[in-house]
Amino acid sequence: MDSVFIIKSLIILGIFAISLTIAAYETYFERVIAAFIQDRVGPDRAGPFGLLQPLADAGKLFFKEDFIPGMADKWLFILGPSLAMLTALMTSAVIPFGDSILYDGQEILVQGIEVNIGILWVFGVVSLGVYGILIGGWASNNKYSLYGAIRAASQNISYELAMGLSIIAVLMMASSLSLRTIVESQHGMNWNIFYQPLGFIIFLTCSFAECNRTPFDLPESENELVAGYHTEYGSMKLGLYLFSEYVNMFISSAVIATLFLGGFNYPGMDWVYATMTENFGAVVGHNLSTLAGTLVFFAKIFAFIFLFMWVRWTLPRFRYDQLMDLGWKGLIPLAIVNLIITAAAELSGHALLVNWIGLGVFIALVYAWSAIFGTKKTSL
């Protein structure tokens, strides 16, 4: 068998395994961070420092009784969590986790598949994820589950619009739909976050909503809907729903780092590459440089995962009307304004300057409007 094919297969399996492992231990670190913020003891019984807690949780769910409600649609009830998990894992296929590996005179990309429409792949697969929630809520034949599923569908559709518009601004600057090309256009410290500060904020906010994370966790708000769309689920079917949320959080962090923080690019990477190749040769030096970029990329991902968890234990949940107002009346107009500013910046040839001037003018106008006409006061 071709050795290059074997290495590429190992990369694909590695991406799959890493996605699952990180998602599993996100549950552990979520509890550790929550305990730290709330000044209490986190998991400390299963293994040293509680490190085996994710395995204990998986065993608990796996050996629980698996049941299907009598009035539920059996096949759709099974399909719901399966679809949610499948779409969550498929998204990682097009994310460039590193530059490339040189082996046997060939260059192997540290990426599952490289397609020239990578960002459309991400958006298309993420859009299908809502069907898993909607099918599960409807198939349960439970009014609370159905209500949570409807909330999830309307929330995801609403925030996908603003997210898509914020991505278009990035695509205008990179002139490509390929995630690898977008990363390569941010070589060194030429990161899009410096050119798209408003787009970054919009995309980050929409990511919280797409992942159903606090303060946008309305589809499963336990004080109103018991548990929302997965109320009737137990055993590993419930585990797939809960696990898919953490996989989505990992993938969202990876996409944010790819689009706005340069992916595997980092300051001084050219110097590191030159030093590695000088000391270890062209092939080994290139591969070590790729490893350094991959480690930097995962550091960026972990930083955003920490942000997701930090926000969860800091901010209160929105009301549903506030959630929809923010999406339709706040983020979509902001994304359109950002798109216009980006177009003007690209035509002017001074993208960095015009984007920041445009952002400053827009913030000043919003502040003036609120000072003159006042703001609508609502309570959480």
Image (cartoon, rainbow, N blue to C red):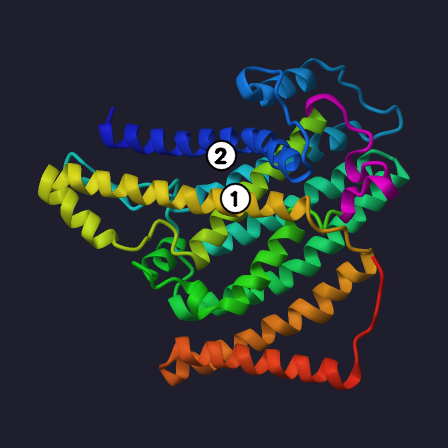
- In the image, taking residue 112 as reference, residue 159 lies left or right, namely right
Q: Residue at x 81, y 56 (%)?
A: 320
Determine whether label 1 and label 2 are within 8 Å by CB.
Answer: yes
Image quadrant in which you'd find residue 104: top left
Q: Which residues are magenta?
A: 218-236
Q: Is residue 312 visible?
A: yes
Q: Residue at x 23, y 28 (%)?
A: 2
Q: Looking at the picture, tell me which residue is in the foreground, 354 or 93.
A: 354
Residue labelled with disc 2: 19
Asked if residue 50 is positioned above or below residue 193 in the image, the reply reads: above
As helix, strand or loop, the secondary structure at mark 1 comes to helix
Image quadrant in which you'd find residue 183: bottom left
Q: Residue at x 59, y 70 (%)?
A: 335
Image quadrant in which you'd find residue 62: top right
Q: Residue at x 25, y 24 (%)?
A: 1
- In the image, taking residue 112 as reference, residue 87 lies left or right, namely right
As for residue 376 lying within the magenta part, the answer is no
Q: Position of residue 374 (x, y in %)?
A: 79, 80
Q: Position of residue 93 (x, y in %)?
A: 45, 41
As helix, strand or loop, the secondary structure at mark 2 comes to helix
What's under tag 2, amino acid-wise? Ser
Residue labelled with disc 1: 251
Q: Looking at the picture, tell me which residue is in the foreground, 98 or 55.
A: 55
Q: Position of residue 212 (x, y in %)?
A: 69, 46
Q: Is residue 213 visible?
A: no
